[in-house]
Image (tube, rainbow, N blue to C red):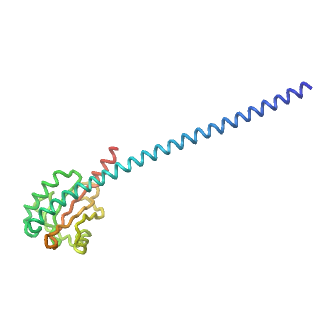
């Protein structure tokens, strides 16, 4: 009889031990799962904050270049367009403007014919026909007062790529006075992202 009682007590203790072990495993799994979910949520919030910072930086980077191009476009339009100005005058104006834009590799001015008139980075420049470039074609077909963001291209001045931001010079009578092109160096953005 005592053997049966001990066997019953032993089975009861083993069942209680197994139940406690199962409860411990379930609790551990829940704790790990909650910690995992909390970690994922913290990473998600961090990534959203980082995305907002990067979005603001890109908007500010492009906005600053566009503001400078818009100011130059207005100045050149008031003087009758690029066709009324000489290379040196335009070069000096662009060079001064580019000095405030560390993100730009260069700023250039393109005549209504598509020929490059001047560039901030160098003087004199060799004549280059840009009439087949996407920004020039866009502004020829769409005489709008909005910036144009072109595809990336190889940076001839340094490692990396360039993103062209262009603006049309609109004369008072609606004709084109040329376009201005700002070349934004992708390395500027890469360096900023690396510092985050």
Is residue 110 shown left or right of residue 194?
Answer: left
Residue at the spot x=22%, y=72% of the render?
Answer: 143
Extreme bottom residue here? 141
Estimate the x, y position of residue 28 in percent, counting from the top left: 62, 37
Estimate the x, y position of residue 17 in percent, counting from the top left: 74, 32
Extreme right residue here? 1
Total label count?
0
For the question of whether residue 156 can be seen, the reply is: no
Residue at the spot x=27%, y=51% of the render?
Answer: 188
The answer to whether residue 185 is above or below residue 136 is above
Is residue 174 shown left or right of residue 24?
Answer: left
Estimate the x, y position of residue 26 in percent, counting from the top left: 65, 39
| Residue sitting nearer the eye, 157 or 24 | 24
Estimate the x, y position of residue 121 in percent, counting from the top left: 15, 57
Residue at the spot x=87%, y=27% of the render?
Answer: 5
Give the position of the N terminus as an image quadrant.
top right
Q: Give the quarter of the image for residue 92.
A: bottom left
Extreme front residue here? 172
For the question of whether residue 25 can be seen, the reply is: yes
Q: Give the quarter of the image for residue 175.
A: bottom left
Is residue 6 shown left or right of residue 84?
Answer: right
Give the position of the C terminus as an image quadrant.
top left
Q: Give the quarter of the image for residue 96.
A: bottom left
């Amino acid at each position: 009889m005592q053997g049966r009682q001990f066997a019953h007590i032993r089975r009861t203790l083993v069942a209680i031990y197994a139940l406690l072990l199962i409860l411990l495993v379930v609790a551990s799994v829940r704790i790990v799962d909650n910690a995992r979910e909390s970690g994922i949520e913290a990473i998600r919030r961090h990534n959203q904050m980082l995305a907002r910072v990067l979005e603001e930086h890109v908007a500010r980077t492009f906005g600053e270049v566009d503001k400078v191009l818009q100011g130059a476009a207005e100045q050149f339009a008031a003087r009758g367009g690029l066709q009324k100005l000489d290379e040196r005058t335009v070069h000096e104006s662009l060079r001064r403007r580019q000095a405030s834009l560390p993100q730009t590799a260069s700023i250039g001015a393109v005549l209504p014919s598509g020929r490059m008139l001047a560039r901030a980075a160098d003087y004199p420049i060799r004549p280059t026909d840009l009439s087949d470039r996407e920004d020039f074609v866009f502004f020829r077909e769409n005489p709008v007062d909005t910036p144009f963001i072109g595809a990336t291209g190889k940076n001839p001045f340094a490692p990396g790529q360039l993103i062209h931001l262009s603006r049309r010079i609109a004369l008072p009578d609606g004709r084109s006075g040329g376009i201005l092109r700002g070349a934004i160096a992708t390395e500027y953005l890469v360096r900023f992202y690396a510092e985050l």
